[in-house]
Amino acid sequence: MVDVAPLSGTVQVPGDKSISHRALMLAALCEGVVDVHGLGSGGDNGSTARILKQLGVRLEVVGDVTRVHGVGLGGLRAPAEPLDCGNSGTTMRLMLGIVAGQPFEATLIGDDSLSGRPMRRVLEPLSRMGLEILEIREGEYAPVRVRGRRPLTAMNYVSPVASAQVKSAVLLAGLWANGETAVTEPAPSRDHTERMLAYLGHPPQAKPLYVPGDLSSAAFILGAALLTPNSRVTVRDVGVNPTRTGVLDAFEAMGIGVTRSDERERCGEPRADLTVAHAPLKPFTISGTLAVRAIDELPLLATLASRAAGVSEIRDAQELRVKESDRIRKTVELLRSFGVRAEERPDGLRIHGDPSRPLRAGRIDAHGDHRIAMCAFLLAAIAPPGSVVTGAASIDSSFPSFHETLEALAR
């Protein structure tokens, strides 16, 4: 490994992207003003905010607070233009759940990456509740033009996949249904929507919302410390919802102790300060429910596995193929670019780690996938000079201060 300055210090990461989406949407459906503290600053959350404005919701920024003037369950208005979700699959899928309960038409569009991600899995249950699909691209890809109705038909949906986006879309649509709506999943997915609905009530009541730091973003900072000798870092005020902490369980499987301090709960979401120190990494196998709980961090875990002594495997992760990119294929390409032996599997990948094997300068096109891009930069930091990472502007969609945060820890 090349000589790299250790990382040291305490930092804070942007607000949790998943919780921020839901905070904005549910605040808009409250009657009255909701102050949202700690909102994520990435482009994906910006897409949700922009669409809510198109639907007649007033938002204003007051210091570090986003003030949402909620319009209630009956106050959204028909948009004059298509609703542009940018690169955010969460925005599109959850907004389809909200639009399903509105007595008007709406067209949802996205960038090239989002337009290649399937919408079938969310449109199928919503259409059974009453959402009318007026126009959609072949293969059930965006853009999609729909017409909602009120009331919708309540349902008990048995989902074939564990997907927080599908579950949340159905539950949000259930706010306008004529009875109780429930979702059953094959494995637990993140439960931010359920927690926030429990906190705000039904119909949602205007209360302050506090968004914890994004665990997925924090994981990349912790991962950087695990890759860099003599490092020790702390990330403050991070969300540690049990449905999201798969990455922390995976760290422990690699022999890494993650210290939690100042544990507390606010607005139904647990949070804590997280500290790790560099140590030798052990190989691991991730499958089953742990693969679901760590789905967004699996490329990072594969990156860490490249410096573990032995073979690591990720299984039961087919969902990675329909993210911002085919993350199984792109992660394998990334690792191989830096000289790491890795093999693609239908539902995951195998990584042959060796901490003594020198990396080489990599060359990778992230194709607009922010997590692949961040993994590439972590490896580039410990590889010889000359790595080239393109298609990385999408990091701004989730963690716009990524580079600055790492630079602050390296001083």
Image: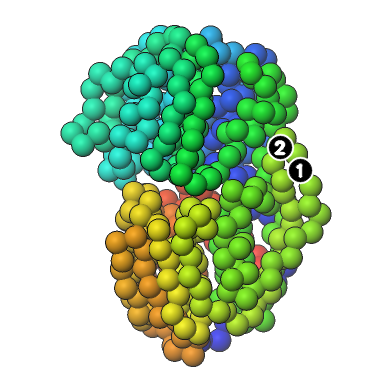
Residue indicated by mark 2: 268
Residue at 49% across, 32% down: 183
Which residue is painted at 33% across and 29% down in the image?
A: 124
Q: Callout 2: 10 Å neighbours few (<14), some, many (20+)?
A: some
Secondary structure under tag 1 reads strand
In the rendered view, tell whether residue 351 sits above or below residue 374. below
Name the residue type under label 2: Gly
Label 1 crowding class (10 Å Cα cut-off): few <14, some 14-19, many 20+? few
Q: Residue lying farthest left?
A: 138
Tell me if 200 is positioned left or right of 391 in this view: right
Q: Residue at x 61, y 63 (%)?
A: 249
Q: Are marks 2 and 1 in contact (CB under 8 Å)?
A: yes
- Image coordinates of residue 75 in percent, x first then y, are 53, 10
Residue 91 location (% of width, % of height):
45, 34
Return the residue nearer the eye: 22 or 250.
250
The image's colouring method is rainbow
* Picture quadrant where residue 226 is located: bottom right
The image position of residue 130, as x and y in percent, is: 37, 16
**Residue 265, label in figure:** 1
Residue 410 visible in the snapshot: no
**Foreground of the two, 410 or 331:** 331
Above or below for 148 versus 193: above
